[in-house]
Amino acid sequence: MLSGQVVLKIKDLVKNYDQRAVLKGLTLTVSQGEVLVVIGPSGCGKSTLLRCLNGLEPVNGGQIIFEGQYLTDPQTNWSRIRQRVGMVFQNYELFPHLTALENILLGPIKVQNKSREEALAKAEYWLNRVDLWDRRHSFPRQLSGGQKQRVAIVRALAMDPEIMLFDEVTASLDPEMVREVLDVITNLAQEGLTMLIVTHEMAFARAVADRIIFLDDGGIVEDSTPDVFFQNPATERARRFLNIFHYDDIHKPNGSLNLAKNNL
């Protein structure tokens, strides 16, 4: 699925909170169609990285270049950029007073000025894809955690983004609901959508990723393929991190997850 064309460049990215450095000169590139999974211990800067890429956190140094546009320019129109760089959060961020369908239609109609008919057709397509068309008139309080997260993913996809950022989208879910969300993301990977995914689901990371980025203390410790990283990590720090997970959490069969990776 990879085109080889670099769509996102991050150069020497620095992010501080007060006097504490969270990202310390981080540099990486993402190619079109690539699925890059970011893992690492809590507090290492994973979520901060995604929030910087979507303009939710100002940076203190370095550059973010998306398809030739410098997003660190103070004149960046983040409203337009967020239509092209979608983001899904771990806590859904759905409007509680709107139905699932209304949550999805809001952006295309109000921000992109699409007709209701066009926006509705797109919403119907994606809701059917995630098996939620029959719940379109339900309010968030009437949906399970997994259903709410799938609605949140559809809301982002309805804007036709060129790249998607997923920030621990299963962290708030009960274990039985995790799979339905991961299957949606796996299918998107099969179709070649460019994605940056922050997750603690190691089996999922191994199955879906083209590359694994291991962060620690605000920097990239390892940048590797999934097989190399999980079978033979290059650093002692990565080995210690992987040792906290049970062997089965990384290597057990995962049904459609394994099949999806084989089809990438």
Image: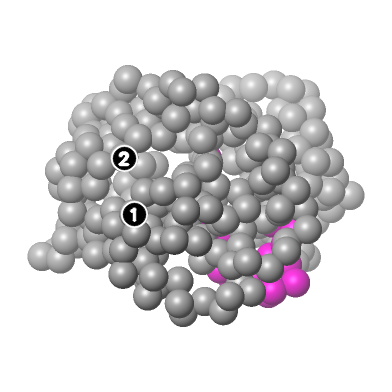
Please state the extent of the stretch shown in magenta in the rendering: 164-181
**Relative to 12, does residue 70 appear above or below in the rendering?**
above
Q: Residue at x 41, y 34 (%)?
A: 30
Q: Mark 2 points at which residue?
A: 28
Q: Which image quarter holds the C terminus? A: top right
Residue 58's label in the rendered image is: none
Q: Name the residue under label 1.
A: 222
Rendering quarter of residue 170: bottom right
Could you tell me if residue 55 is visible in this image? no
Observer-nearest of 142 and 222: 222
Residue 8 in the figure: left or right of residue 120 = left
Rendering quarter of residue 107: top right
Q: Residue at x 59, y 41 (%)?
A: 156
Q: What element carries label 1?
A: strand
Rendering quarter of residue 114: top right
Q: Where is residue 217 in the image (x, y as percent from the top left)?
A: 24, 65
Compare marks 2 and 1 and give the one earlier in the sequence. 2
Q: Position of residue 52 (x, y in %)?
A: 32, 46
Colour scheme in the image? Answer: one colour
